[in-house]
Image (tube, helix red, strand yellow):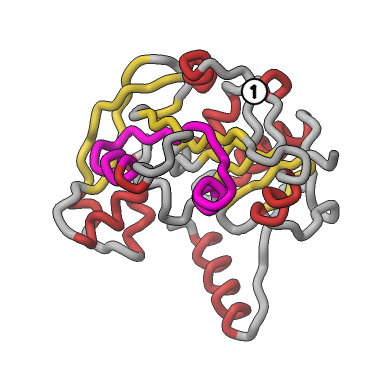
């Protein structure tokens, strides 16, 4: 690990133990953020769009750490949940069995239609099932989870999965526009965002994971959202783009 990252992590740890934290932000949004959450913005959206159409890319089981699920379950949101991994997709299908207004698609979203190699921990027990939440197109991204799963390197296996571009998927679903777009693909999020014509798709909310991206990619992600007319805020894990009107 680079010495700079070690020093930063040590400094953050020391400050955290004293009740402080250091959080880097892309320069375009520094000083311009408003403290809002996805839940607050989603609730506000329902004042004008009572049952938004949502797309969840990288849905996993559709429930674990998924901010869309409570709105789908309790408020009638409809849309599509996208998950390529067989075990996770089976869990997604079970969890959404009583939610017929959500279409389930077993595929990954990527730059080109076709197939690609996705890396994930082999599911053999409860521990490896938790590891499977970290499926990624990058094996290196999975290896960063060694702090939680020391033996993850021995469990990683490649999977060939079908891949669709988002515009291809929307055409299959008979949709042109989406109200809420969530992207959670363990390091591939910016690659997907680059393929999306946000002016055409017109989402009101975009939630994209940035945790596995280098700073230059976070800057680009924020820039793309800002250029499309979004205001931008972020947590340690996700970047949230939202329209003020």
Q: In the image, residue 123 lies at what x, y percent?
A: 19, 50
Based on the displayed image, in which of its 4 quarters is residue 230 positioned?
top right
Which residues fall within the magenta stretch? 68-93
- The answer to which image quadrant residue 194 occupies is top right
Is residue 140 among the parts visible in the rendering?
no
Instruction: Mark 1: give few (<14), some (14-19) or many (20+) Cα within 10 Å.
Output: some
Q: Report which residue position mark 1 lands on.
A: 177
Which residue lies at the image location 76% right of the left edge and 29% below the top edge? 228
User: Residue 113's spot in the image, x, y percent?
Assistant: 41, 15
Task: Give percent across and percent down for residue 210.
Answer: 56, 46
Residue 140 is situated, as x and y percent measured from the top left of the image, at 36, 44
- Camera-nearest residue between 99 and 10: 99
Depth check: give the residue in front, 119 or 42: 42
Q: Is residue 239 above or below residue 173?
A: below
Q: Residue at x 32, y 40 (%)?
A: 93
What residue sits 42% from the left and 20% below the top?
A: 164
Q: Main secondary structure of the magenta part?
A: helix
């Amino acid at each position: 690990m680079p010495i700079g990252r070690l020093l930063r992590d040590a400094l953050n740890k020391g400050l955290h133990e004293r009740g402080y934290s250091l959080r880097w932000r892309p320069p375009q949004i520094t000083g311009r953020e408003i403290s809002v959450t996805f839940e607050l913005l989603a609730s506000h959206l329902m004042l004008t769009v009572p049952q938004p159409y949502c797309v969840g890319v990288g849905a996993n089981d559709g429930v674990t750490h998924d901010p869309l699920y409570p709105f789908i379950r309790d408020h009638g949101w409809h849309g599509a949940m996208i998950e390529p991994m067989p075990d996770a997709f089976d869990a997604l299908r079970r969890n959404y069995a009583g939610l017929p207004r959500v279409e389930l698609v077993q595929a990954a979203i990527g730059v080109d239609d076709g197939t690609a190699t996705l890396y994930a921990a082999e599911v053999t027990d409860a521990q490896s099932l938790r590891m499977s939440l970290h499926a990624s197109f990058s094996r290196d991204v999975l290896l960063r989870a060694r702090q939680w799963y020391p033996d993850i390197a021995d469990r990683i296996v490649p999977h060939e999965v079908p891949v669709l571009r988002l515009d291809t998927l929307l055409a299959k679903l008979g949709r042109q526009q989406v109200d809420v777009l969530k992207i959670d693909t363990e390091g591939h999020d910016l690659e997907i965002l680059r393929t999306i014509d946000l002016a055409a798709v017109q989402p009101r909310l975009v939630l994209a994971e940035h945790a596995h991206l280098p700073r230059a990619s976070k800057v680009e992600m924020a820039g793309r959202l800002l250029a499309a007319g979004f205001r931008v805020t972020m947590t340690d894990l996700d970047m949230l783009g939202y329209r003020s009107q």
